[in-house]
Amino acid sequence: MSSGEYIVSLDIGTSKVRVIVAEVTRENTQIVGVGSAVSKGTKKGAIIDIDQAVQSIREAIDHAERMVGIDISNVFVGISGHHVALQSSHGVVAVSGENKEIGQEDIDRVMQAARVVALPPERAVVEVVPKQFVVDGLREIQDPHGMVGVRLEVEATIVTGAKTIIHNVLRCVEKADLSVAGIILLPLAAGEICLSTDERNMGVVLADIGGGTTSLAVYEQGHLSATSVLPIGGEYITHDIAYGLRTQTETAEKLKRKYGVALVEEANEEITFEVQTIGSHREKTVSQKELGMIIEPRVEEIFQLIRDEVESMGYVDEPAGGYVLTGGVMSIPHALGAARNQLGQAVRMVSPRHIGVEDPSFTSGVGMIHYIRRRFLHRLPEGNGQQRSSNKKGGHSTWMKLKNFFGEFI
């Protein structure tokens, strides 16, 4: 393993808190550890009990620390939700170097200029995402490093969020004895590993179907153009199973994971299992087909709601790049087939391709790692470096360099 920088992503979901530890250099990204815990104190993606949320975060961090053998103190935190909004911005600066070669300092200054916008007092800038750079009128530049010019401009998308909601998330992280290195918009992070360049350019909808919410991101002409969140996810399927079989929610979740199928026609009636019913000491025998008859309608509804929400966002025609689906619900066998029944044939499913995290529920966390690496490639150490950050308090200065490029919450 080459010597590099440890970067940790923290995804506080409705059903699970997930932590991913990666060693990142300019040449390579290697997942070295993961941690997860049952998410408590959250509902539909929002914090409703700080103490319980802190406990869940700490459990997931401890799990990852034991696996990797380091003390984690700095994390990048993912956010999403209805409170997130996007708006366009523009920044311009004069190139400062004597030889007029554009360096990192110039790019930093133009990005800071782009984030100076008028906002209501209850909102704040979370992140500035560059669409393109312009050097002396030359447009469509993705990386101006090393170019020569007098005037540097950036056209960017500003991600803003509700201060109170984000402060509650950060409060939980800090109470778990962690320092926030940055805040990442989860749809951007997921898009980093889910979408191809052609899909982004053609127009595509990315849906991350989690436990309590479904996050939607629409990409057009290579960039994120709209986001939305639906208050529905895998928990609704679990609740339907619990109600339909008159059993406990915990039992329903286990049955969904072990025997669940999203299409009744794919179920095997000969596969049966015993279910302990509430209010009775007796068990009843249930077939996989009966379980599928409960799951399929709810899965269909989720995909119908995704289609309706995309239309309500102003995208009436089917996206040229179709739909890309990820998230825990897509782990249910034949969920992709159910999706195609509702969304058309231009649908595919994505899971991370890393040992230990080949699960669509880890997509956002892994995406955050790759997103950070791409955006801050010039601040990462070379692969042949002699020191490796231990991610301990007061660790490598790279953390401070990265923190300067996120919102005022940090």
Image (spheres, rainbow, N blue to C red):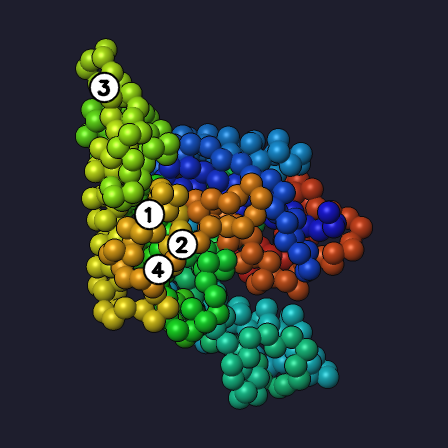
Mark 3 or mark 2: name the one nearer the start of the chain: 3
Judge the density around disc 4: few (<14), some (14-19), many (≥20) Cα neighbours within 10 Å. Answer: many
Judge the density around disc 1: few (<14), some (14-19), many (≥20) Cα neighbours within 10 Å. Answer: many
Q: Residue tagged by mark 3?
A: 284
Question: What's the CA distance linking mark 4 and mark 1?
Answer: 11 Å
Q: Is residue 143 above or below residue 75?
A: below
Give the residue at x 48% y 40%. Answer: 18
Pick the residue in front: 27 or 320. Answer: 320
Pick the residue in front: 106 or 237. Answer: 237
Mark 3 or mark 4: name the one nearer the start of the chain: 3
Q: Is residue 310 left or right of residue 173?
A: left
Q: Residue tagged by mark 1?
A: 335
Based on the displayed image, in which of its 4 quarters is residue 394 positioned? top right
Q: Residue tagged by mark 2?
A: 349
Q: Are marks 3 and 4 in contact (CB under 8 Å)?
A: no
Q: Residue tagged by mark 4?
A: 347
Q: Position of residue 245 (x, y in %)?
A: 21, 27
Q: Under tag 4, what secondary structure?
A: strand
Q: Amino acid at mark 3?
A: Lys
Q: Is residue 350 left or right of residue 335?
A: right
Question: What's the CA distance linking mark 4 and mark 2?
Answer: 7 Å
